[in-house]
Image (cartoon, rainbow, N blue to C red):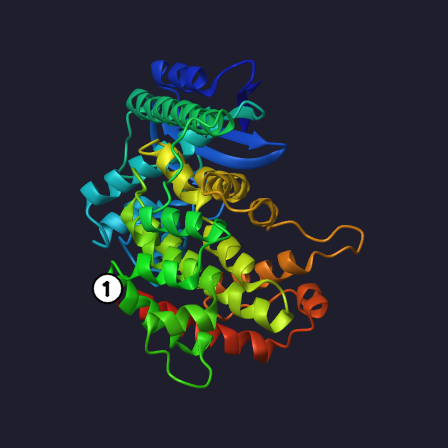
Amino acid sequence: MAVLLQAELNFMPLHDIMQWIDMNRISCEVVVSEQNETAIIFYMESGKIIFASSNKPGKRLGEFLVMSGVMSELEARSALKESRNQGVSFTRYLINKNLITLQVLNENFAKLVEMLLVEVLSCCNASVSVKTPLPESVINGPIQLETGRAIFDAVRVIDEMERDTRKRDEAFENINRRIFNEEFQLPVMPGVVVQLSALIQNENSSFQDMAKLIMTDQILVSSILKIANSALYGGTGQVDSLQFAIVKLGMREIMNIVTAIQLKSVKFQGVPQEKLQTILDNSLKTAFMASGLARLCRLDPEEAFMAGLLLDLGQTVILSVAGNSRIEQTLLDDILRSRHAEIGALIAKKWNYPESIQRLIRYHHNQNFGGISNRMIDMIQIADSIIQTNGEGEPGTEQMTSLQLSYEAVLDVYSKTIDTYQRIRSL
């Protein structure tokens, strides 16, 4: 086999070489190799592309036809074997045996060539060899793809990809810039929660003052009683009055419950409803889960509750900032994962929660350093892990050990948490 041309693609672009072949109506193989490994071969007859192959899985014609649903894997394997036995091209065999129509074959071959051209035209670190003559196994096929048209379509796809990439990069940078500069609206605390917060901070306030404030909303009263009688807050005796609930659970715990109930009334502009609902649902579950675990670990259940409730609310702000930006989901997920904690801490600050809760939210993904463990963060991580995996995940061994928790105890709290959550969802 004679070599007509050999070059590096960073010096001589492939589309120039193929257009030269087309112009001179040459019959040859165009072999594109990456790091001395043959990657893609275009077979050209009189300047037109009649076949293409690749040593990469999924980028051979038979495999491509199978993935496109045109034929079964068994049919493709059998056709390839028989075409070799009969000494005819694979494409000719498909047509002769009526395994595929010429139109469908042409359409799928054009798609395959476009995909292969996009790959090699986007690659600079490769070499190309133009060899002649063509092997007998590919000549006399039914396909003759116009080279100029194929290159034009591939270049158009590359341009669109680069344009989309630029737009995604710009969107990504814009979102990060707005977050860094705090160019966003934080959700506003529900009005009744603001009133309760002010009431609790007043040293002269009593549980009667709290009851009087809440009693103005009978639906809220009913909701509080429903939750106070859930398994998570269960004990001896039925809680049948708001006053008894406040005395039994405490003013701060009641405020936590009211905040959880009122969370669904908070306005989150520009956040897709489905994603918002998932975040809010997980926030409620994590809050009650953290509170239940805190009681087992003799930690502050009220602090744990609020930290759990606000843990992932920062995601709503990021989604709002992202809006309709054309950004890949993987990039958006990266921003959600890396930035939601700091924004959640800002929400806690705006809602006038103590610095201890702000710090818990800000650093809730931190692992212990040098063997020094923060028990509250360990507990929050367990609660978050259990909720994110719907009770099926295995909490971290280090966290479980530091808190002296058993997996059975955690699952028991999870079961009670779901019962309480279902009560809120049914309100």
Picture quarter containing residue 258? bottom left
Q: Residue furthest right?
A: 370
The quarter of the rendered structure image containing the N terminus is: top right
Residue drawn where x is 41% and y is 41% of the image: 329
The quarter of the rendered structure image containing the C terminus is: bottom left
Q: Is residue 412 above or below residue 77?
A: below
Q: Position of residue 163 (x, y in %)?
A: 37, 22
Q: Position of residue 99 (x, y in %)?
A: 24, 55
* Residue 265 visible in the snapshot: yes
Where is mark 1, residue-wise? 218
Depth order, front residue of 171/268: 268
Q: How many marks?
A: 1
Indicate left or right for 101 with 134 as reference.
left
Depth order, front residue of 426/270: 426
Residue drawn where x is 40% and y is 25% of the image: 27
Amino acid type, residue under disc 1 in the picture? Gln
Q: Position of residue 76 (x, y in %)?
A: 35, 56
Q: Residue furthest bottom?
A: 236
Q: Position of residue 231 (x, y in %)?
A: 43, 78
Q: Dot 1: what SS?
A: helix
Q: Is residue 118 above or below residue 331?
A: above
